[in-house]
Amino acid sequence: MVLTIYYTSVSGSREVKQQQHAIFQYLDSMKIKYNLIDIATSNDLKEEMYRKTGKTEIMPPQIFNGDIYCGDYSMFFEAVEDMKVKEFFQLK
């Protein structure tokens, strides 16, 4: 399966931009394929992200493997620190 990352191309938050970049950079370095969904292009996509995560008080990036919710940046960062990225992304 290909990973899907809900992100935003329009953010006033430096932190969000850095978090998104860190995830993209990691995936690119590991040659892991992913699709990007820019929630800034449509409110429907933002609502889709909320619906799929089951949360409304979240910020991008949000990561999925197919329909399986992997987590957000803090969960990704923790997986990297614990060397459990493969498990986090639910890759086989």
Image: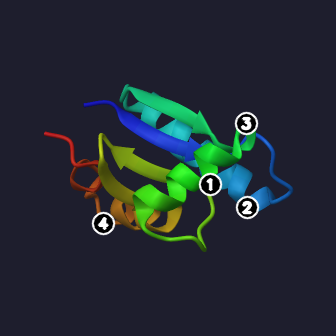
The front one of 17 and 69 is 69
**Residue 29 appears at what percent x and percent y?**
45, 30
CB contact under 8 Å: marks 2 and 1: yes
* Direction from residue 54 to residue 37 in the image, left or right: right
Distance between the alpha carbons at the discs numbered 3 and 2: 20 Å
The kind of secondary structure element at disc 1 is helix
CB contact under 8 Å: marks 3 and 2: no
Q: Amino acid at mark 3?
A: Thr
Q: Which residue is mark 2?
A: 15
Q: Which residue is mark 3?
A: 41
**Residue 55 appears at what percent x and percent y?**
49, 71
Q: Give the residue at the far bottom of this rendering.
A: 57
Quadrant that contains the N terminus: top left
Residue depicted at x 30% and y 40%: 66
Q: Which residue is mark 1?
A: 19
CB contact under 8 Å: marks 3 and 4: no
**Residue 68 appears at what percent x and percent y?**
28, 51
Q: Amino acid at mark 1?
A: Gln
Quadrant that contains the C terminus: top left
The kind of secondary structure element at disc 4 is loop
Residue depicted at x 34% and y 62%: 79
Q: Amino acid at mark 4?
A: Asp
Residue depicted at x 38% and y 25%: 31
Q: Which residue is mark 4?
A: 82
Distance between the alpha carbons at the discs numbered 2 and 1: 6 Å
Q: Give the residue at the far left of this rendering.
A: 92
